[in-house]
Image (cartoon, rainbow, N blue to C red):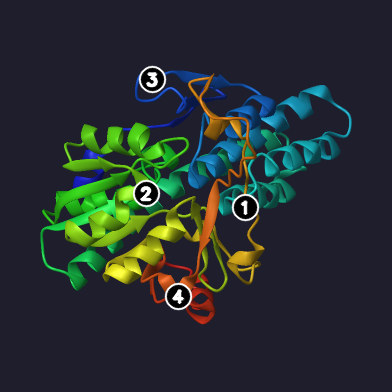
């Protein structure tokens, strides 16, 4: 199955080439495939904040490469470059606060910095670390796809109808995708009849990005309004909701794209299983519960405007980007280290102690 997954890789959103980070501008998809060349930490921070690059794994990878760009600039400027680099770490950490992969990637780059700071070319060592972070995410995607497919195979017959929300595919990661990786794997294994794709307001990641990715792979899909999800569960024979995650707390609570929580509630009511697919780098054992996860809120224009044209009345707006799904609504969390069914603090702690894939 792994070889078939590798052969099916088509979409790439992040490229590191000749010392420059290139990002596929996801604000313009699917109408245009424009690339942004980022040659400074400020350019990467702006790409993250403006949603040109999005998805927790992709943001973490981009931030790792941004540290390389920052280190090169600080070394060239001379002086106390390590103290100056701390400003760049702080800037990157605040770009988007919810995703666990961002802080994880920055911590990993900082650890490498501690080991290479006295080398002749510390930026070269940091570049190798960023490349390793990128490659490990791709490998994790492939492993999670295999685990997720086996979980689906174990619990229901084939073929099946699945439902997903947001975009947790190649555009949001360094490789095949997390939730969409499982969906792609199920399709390759002949286990998938159709995918129902929530449009995912207000940025429409489902309709603009996920539908585009799946259609490019020839996977049967139906796009639906977010509000239709419960009706679809009731009438279309959906067996699994498969989603990604921004951050997972120690007890198994999951921060995901806004609307994920209500999907989990509806799934439990309709007897539909709920799967979260995320690399172990998304698990933050330092946060006891989902209540401790910082949830980003964005500008009211995202709800009041379309294409820069104001459509809504001038009213107060609440625009949270993410919500928290309690662990007791989740059937399984799939990571590259293994599967945790009915997650809780003890099971996640045990998972994170594993040093090799299981």
Q: Position of residue 61 (x, y in %)?
A: 53, 41
Residue that numbered label 3 is attached to: 33
At horizontal 28% and vertical 42% (from top left) the residue drawn is 224
The residue singled out by tag 4 in the image is 328
**Tag 4's secondary structure?**
helix
Q: Badge 4: how crowded within 10 Å, few (<14), some, or many (20+)?
A: some
Query: Which is closer to the viewer, label 3 or label 2?
Result: 2
Task: Point out which mark residue 295 bears.
Answer: 1
Residue nearest the viewer, comparing 172 with 141: 172
Q: CA distance from mark 3 to mark 2?
A: 22 Å
Disc 4 or 1, which lies upstream in sequence? 1
Mark nearer the N terminus (2 vs 4)? 2
> Is 336 drawn above or below residue 317 in the view shown?
below
Q: Nearer the viewer, residue 349 or 295?
A: 295
Query: Is tag 1's residue or tag 2's residue first in the polypeptide sequence?
Result: 2
Q: Which of disc 3 and disc 1 is earlier in sequence?
A: 3
Query: Spatial distance from mark 1 to mark 2, Cα to Cα?
Result: 18 Å
Marks counted in the figure total 4
Quarter of the rendering occupied by the N terminus: bottom left
Category of crowding for the residue at label 2, using alpha-carbon neighbours closer than 10 angstroms: few (below 14), some (14–19), many (at least 20):
many
Callouts 1 and 2 close, C-beta under 8 Å: no
Mark 1: which secondary structure?
Answer: loop
Residue at point 75%, 36% (across, down) = 88
Visible residue check, residue 1: no
**Residue 18 position within the rendered picture, expressed as x and y whole percent measured from the top left:** 53, 21
Residue 301 percent coordinates (x, y): 59, 30
Please report the residue visible at 66 percent of the width from the left and 39 percent of the height from the top.
95
């Amino acid at each position: 199955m792994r070889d078939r997954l590798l052969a099916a890789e088509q979409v790439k959103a992040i490229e590191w080439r000749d010392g420059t980070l290139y990002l596929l501008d996801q604000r313009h998809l699917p109408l245009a495939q424009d690339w942004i060349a980022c040659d400074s930490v400020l350019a990467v921070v702006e790409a993250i904040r403006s949603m040109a690059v999005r998805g927790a794994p992709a943001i973490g990878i981009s931030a790792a490469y941004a540290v390389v760009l920052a280190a090169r600039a600080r070394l060239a400027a001379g002086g106390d470059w390590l103290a100056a680099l701390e400003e760049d770490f702080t800037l990157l950490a605040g770009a988007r606060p919810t995703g666990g992969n961002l802080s994880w990637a920055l911590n990993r780059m900082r650890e490498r910095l501690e080991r290479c700071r006295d080398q002749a070319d510390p930026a070269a060592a940091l570049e190798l670390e960023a490349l390793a972070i990128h490659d490990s995410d791709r490998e994790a995607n492939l492993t999670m796809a295999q685990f997720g497919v086996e979980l689906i195979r174990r619990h229901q017959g084939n073929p099946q109808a699945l439902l997903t929300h947001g975009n947790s595919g190649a555009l949001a990661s360094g490789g095949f995708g997390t939730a969409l990786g499982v969906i792609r794997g199920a399709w390759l294994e002949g286990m998938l009849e159709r995918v129902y794709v929530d449009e995912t307001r207000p940025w429409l990641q489902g309709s603009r990005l996920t539908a585009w990715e799946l259609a490019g792979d020839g996977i049967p899909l139906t796009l639906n309004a977010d509000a239709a999800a419960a009706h679809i569960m009731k009438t279309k024979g959906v067996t699994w909701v498969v989603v990604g995650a921004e951050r997972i707390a120690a007890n198994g609570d999951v921060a995901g794209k806004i609307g994920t929580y209500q999907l989990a509630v509806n799934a439990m009511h309709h007897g539909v299983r709920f799967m979260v697919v995320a690399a172990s780098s998304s698990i933050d054992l330092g946060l006891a519960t989902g209540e401790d996860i910082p949830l980003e809120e964005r500008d009211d224009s995202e709800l009041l405007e379309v294409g820069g044209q104001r459509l809504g009345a001038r009213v107060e707006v609440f625009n949270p980007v993410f919500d928290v799904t309690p662990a007791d609504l989740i059937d399984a969390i799939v990571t590259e280290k293994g599967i945790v069914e009915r997650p809780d603090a003890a099971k996640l702690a045990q998972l994170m102690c594993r040093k090799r894939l299981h």
